[in-house]
Amino acid sequence: MSKIFIKKDRERMWQSGHPWMYSGAVEKIEGKPEAGSVIEVYNWKKEFIGYAHYNKNSKIMLRMLEKDINKKIDLNWYCEKVKEAYSLRTIININSNAYRLIHSESDSLPGVIVDRFGDYLIVQAATLGMEKDKNLLVEALKKEIPNIKGIYEKSEGDGRKLEGLPEVSGVIFGEVPDEIEIYEGKAKFTIDLKGQKTGFYSDQRDNRILMGSLSKEKDFLDVCSYTGGFSLHAMVNGANSSTLIDVSEDVLNVAKKNLKGFENVEFIKGNIFNVLRDLVKEGRQWDVVNLDPPKLAPNRRDLDKALKAYKDIILNGIKLTKKGGLLSIYSCSGAVTSADLRMALAYAVKDAGVKAVIINQLHQSPCHPISVAVPETEYLKGFLIRII
């Protein structure tokens, strides 16, 4: 096996549990390792510090996997990691049969996402190393996760592009239907397992259940509604009405399926910045307003622009909220901290000329655990406020 030696003190993050090592940390390479292969890593004192996936073409050249020299990155190792991840999901209170089973670095499998939907798994391999080891991962999932009828791969997104990988999708085990029904709390959803933009985000599960519980006999506004998760919870819990806004006709069509059993549901297709301003001009207001915009800051370079956009969304959201009503705002941008979002909220409240109190801080569901050593695993944050 080839070896990599890193520069002095560059192992400190790994000693603390963070698995990324950038190309600038590498002192020298012994041998001719294949991109995506497992490689031995040593510090400047020539002491073994771990095994890693190696990719010379990525800024993150090493993704550390294991500190124990006596362990090998084989099927048994993958089974151990999958078993640990599944064990966590069995002890937390998941009020759904749809949840994140493996959350990359938080589950010691950097570059891997696995979501469970009933008897089916959706797998995403975002790194070259995990692409090379995909068969081991799939075998471990088949062995360690009970009652799985099929596994579908949906390896897409910017992460693969950065690793020099094409997008890949398709059934890799068993049979996978186009659609299934899953439950979440009191709500039932139709899930398109193979669709590009008609999936399901389990990171918002606890927030959807919370907002639904607060919406009885209320009028609910669902901004960036996607497939209608928040609205369905609101209506199941006895909301008077729900208005959904999204720019995508595809996801609104799925939302219509999910909400087909309810009356007083309105669907608005359009850019949210334009739609919200138009609704303000019309003088419309709701008891509960839910603002769940897409990722507005892919990286820190986009932060200032994103915070202006968040402030604009929140400001119009406040204007659309009745006095005494509730408003929730979320950010799924890793580059936006909770403090950043709170600052945008404070400016919006000031410009709206209202008073507001934060009554809950909102987070990603516990099936998306946050690694203490890897702050990047915490990405979803939000606030629930009351307009006074």
Image (cartoon, helix red, strand yellow):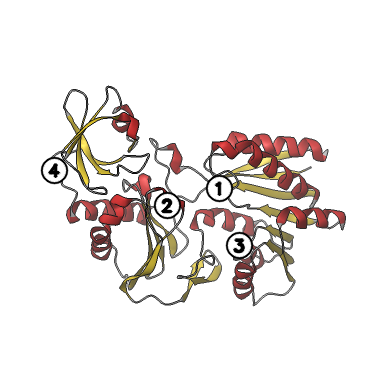
Label 4 – label 1 distance at C-alpha: 39 Å
Pointer 3 local density, CA inside 10 Å: few below 14, some 14–19, many at least 20: many
Element type at mark 3: loop
Q: Quadrant of the N terminus?
A: top left
Q: Residue at x 21, y 46 (%)?
A: 38
Element type at mark 2: helix
Viewer-side residue, 22 vs 226: 22
User: At which x and y percent is residue 141?
Assistant: 28, 62
Name the residue beneath numbered marker 4. Answer: 1
* Label number found at residue 361: none
Residue 142 falls in image quadrant = bottom left
Name the residue beneath numbered marker 3. Answer: 226
Residue 155 falls in image quadrant = bottom left
Name the residue beneath numbered marker 2. Answer: 161
Say which label, 4 or 1, has the lower sequence index: 4
Residue type at mark 2 is: Lys
Say which label, 1 or 2, has the lower sequence index: 2
Query: Which label sits in the foreground, 2 or 3?
Result: 2
Say which label, 4 or 3, has the lower sequence index: 4
Residue type at mark 1 is: Cys
Q: Residue at x 12, y 41 (%)?
A: 70
Name the residue beneath numbered marker 1. Answer: 332
Residue type at mark 3 is: Tyr
User: At which x and y percent is residue 258?
Assistant: 60, 72
